[in-house]
Image (spheres, rainbow, N blue to C red):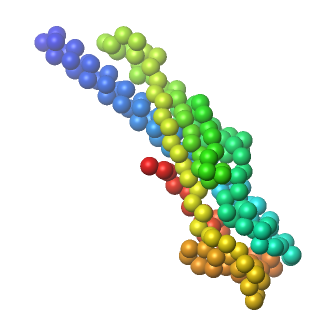
Amino acid sequence: MTGLLLLALTFFVFAQAAVVRSGAQSAADAAALAAAQEARDRMFGDFLEAAREEDSDPEDIEGPVGGDDVGDSGPCAAAARLAASNDAVVTSCESGEGGTAYTVVVESTATVGDSVIPGTENQTATARATAVIGVLCDGVEEGDDGLELRCEERDWVLDPDDEDGLPEARDLFEVYLED
């Protein structure tokens, strides 16, 4: 009977460790997505600024739409905030692929806890996730009605006087977790 109880408690420890690991992976996924979404929002802001200028040229718009690197500081701060709200701490946050991917490594603040297995009381979990900003547009050119932005879903005529006619962030970029 004692053996069965010990076996049951051991299985409980492994289950608790799996829960801690799963929580860390969820925190890493959320943090990576937060970083990529922050970078996407910054690229979209740069796009809007360029598109609203009366005398924009295609190069001013192609940079942000093409995924210009926005750096690590803002996006990684967003990752840290979201990791903290998911009981984890960011141990590494890096941009890659020209600023269109963010890889985040987190460590859980939760532990496996006291158990029949020595050393588990302070055992945490580490997880890694990468989120990618997919660029949905492939160029800007001079058209008959002004600058034309070619995107997967549709082409846009960029008229700085028509705020409602400008695309939204979701029209230019998609954000997803990399497998």
Q: Is residue 163 above or below residue 49?
A: below
- Tell me where residue 29 appears, x and y as whole percent: 50, 44
Relative depth, front residue between 13 and 150: 150
Q: Is residue 146 above or below residue 114?
A: below
Residue 11, located in which quarter of the rendered image? top left
Residue 85 seen from this side: no
Q: Residue at x 13, y 12 (%)?
A: 1
Q: Residue at x 72, y 78 (%)?
A: 141
Residue 152, located in which quarter of the rendered image? bottom right
Q: Residue at x 81, y 79 (%)?
A: 161
- Tell me where residue 116 appears, x and y as whole percent: 31, 12
- Tell me where residue 132 appears, x and y as whole percent: 56, 53
Q: Is residue 119 above or below residue 174?
A: above
Q: Is residue 51 above or below residue 108?
A: below
Residue 147 seen from this side: yes
Residue 140, located in which quarter of the rendered image? bottom right
Q: Residue at x 51, y 55 (%)?
A: 176
- The total of numbered circles placed on residues is 0
Please state if 45 lies on the left or on the right of 120 as rendered: right
Outermost residue on the left side: it is 1
Outermost residue on the bottom side: it is 144
- Tell me where residue 83 appears, x and y as whole percent: 57, 37
